[in-house]
Image (cartoon, helix red, strand yellow):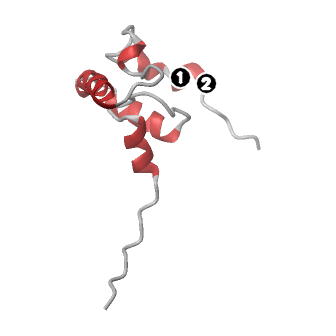
Amino acid sequence: MIPRHRPFAAYWDWQQHALCRGMDSSVFFSPPGERGTAKRAREKKARAVCGSCPVIEVCARIAMNGPESYGVWGGLSEGERSALQRPPRAPRRRRT
């Protein structure tokens, strides 16, 4: 039996309720070469929007389980999502 996939529109329907809907994407996605203070300030602004959003959990889950490699999704930056997806490090053995 062939597995059924969710209809594409239904999969993204949650975005209808997102606070970021219709906002300028530059709040959530960095321009080329953005670093340091500018990047942290932009991400802080994006997180402020995400923090009040009714679909923050769905957004973060989609980004963590999907192909969203860039931008702030569900209040998480690229680096934060990457760190959460890395396997935990084994504890280091102490030398005696």
Per the image, label 2 sits on a secondary structure element best described as loop
Residue 46 is situated, as x and y percent measured from the top left of the image, at 30, 23
Q: Is residue 2 above or below residue 7?
A: below
Q: Residue furthest bottom?
A: 96
Q: Which residue is mark 1?
A: 10
Q: Give the crowd class for mark 2: few <14, some 14-19, many >=20 residues within 10 Å.
A: few
Quadrant for the N terminus, please: top right
Q: Which residue is mark 2?
A: 7
Q: Residue at x 39, y 32 (%)?
A: 58
Q: Residue at x 35, y 35 (%)?
A: 76
> Label 2 vs label 1: CA separation?
5 Å
In the image, taking residue 69 as reference, residue 22 lies left or right, namely left
- Give the residue type at disc 2: Pro
In the image, taking residue 87 as reference, residue 76 lies left or right, namely left
Residue 72 image-quadrant placement? top left
In the image, taking residue 9 as reference, residue 53 lies left or right, namely left
Q: Contact, CB < 8 Å: mark 2 with mark 1? A: yes
Residue 20 is situated, as x and y percent measured from the top left of the image, at 35, 16
Per the image, label 1 sits on a secondary structure element best described as helix
Which is more toward the observer, 85 or 11?
85
Q: Is residue 24 above or below residue 67?
A: above
Residue 43 is situated, as x and y percent measured from the top left of the image, at 31, 27
Q: Which mark is residue 57?
A: none
- Give the residue type at disc 1: Ala
Which is more toward the observer, 69 or 13?
69
Quadrant for the C terminus, please: bottom left
Q: Residue at x 32, y 31 (%)?
A: 36
